[in-house]
Image (cartoon, helix red, strand yellow):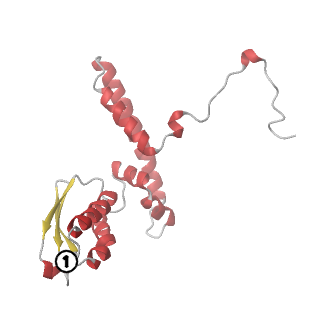
Amino acid sequence: MNAVESITPTEASETRFVPLQTDARKRNHKDAATRLEELFAQLDSISNPAAREIATESVQSVVTLYGEALGRIVKLMDRDDNPVMAAVLKDELLRSLLLVHDLHPQSLDERLLGALDSVRPYLKSHGGNIDVLGVHDGIARLRFQGTCKTCPSSAVTLELAIRRAVTEACPDLIGLELEQGDLEKAKS
């Protein structure tokens, strides 16, 4: 006899359906993030200051609790050669949670350099390159060097590649300042 066969049926008046697939579970993380932003915006519209404060503090407490739990998990995986941590860092949602809770094992500078290194072969194949001039107040200053002479839209294409790589690795940056550099230096 298996576990399902051993359940004794109840009378209809005692039975209620408990859904396992709620709308919240069916949403992907981007939908959930959008919904959270909507709900946070609604917190400000609560007219009762005490209720607004309780709701806000409740959300902050949940975030703090989850951050503490995530921090403990990160400490358990704190090894440079840990394949699980490598997989976590490749996952967009998990990377963003690490950033929200200031738990990302790589600094902003390391992530920025890694992002640029990932597109550098593509840039060089088009006669371009990129240097980091600095990061200040959430803005990365970059010097874009060279362009492909045979492709008039090359500069736009290369800038898009840079933006995509940097946005993925450094969602905590608020912007980029791109400075046009010397074509000859890009070839070196």
Q: Is residue 68 above or below residue 152?
A: above
Residue 16, quarter of the rendered image: top right
The x, y position of residue 95, in whole percent, is 39, 55
Q: Quadrant of the C terminus?
A: bottom left
Residue at left 17%, top 75%? 146
The x, y position of residue 141, in whole percent, is 16, 63
Looking at the rendered structure, the kind of residue marked 1 is: Lys
The x, y position of residue 122, in whole percent, is 31, 74
Q: Nearer the viewer, residue 77 or 92?
A: 92
Can residue 28 be spotted in the picture?
yes
The x, y position of residue 81, in whole percent, is 47, 70
> Does residue 144 appear to the left or right of 75 in the view shown?
left
Q: Is residue 172 above or below residue 23?
A: below
Can residue 65 be spotted in the picture?
no
Residue at the top extreme, as displayed: 13
Q: Quadrant of the N terminus?
A: top right
Residue at the right extreme, as displayed: 1
Q: Nearer the viewer, residue 100 or 167?
A: 167
Residue at left 23%, top 78%? 127
Q: Nearer the viewer, residue 124 or 79?
A: 124
Q: Is residue 182 above or below residue 103?
A: below
> Does residue 171 appear to the left or right of 145 in the view shown?
right
Judging by the rendered image, the residue that carries numbered circle 1 is 149
Q: How many numbered circles does the render carry? A: 1
- How crowded pointer 1 is (Cα within 10 Å; few <14, some 14-19, many 20+) is rated as few
Residue at left 53%, top 39%? 26
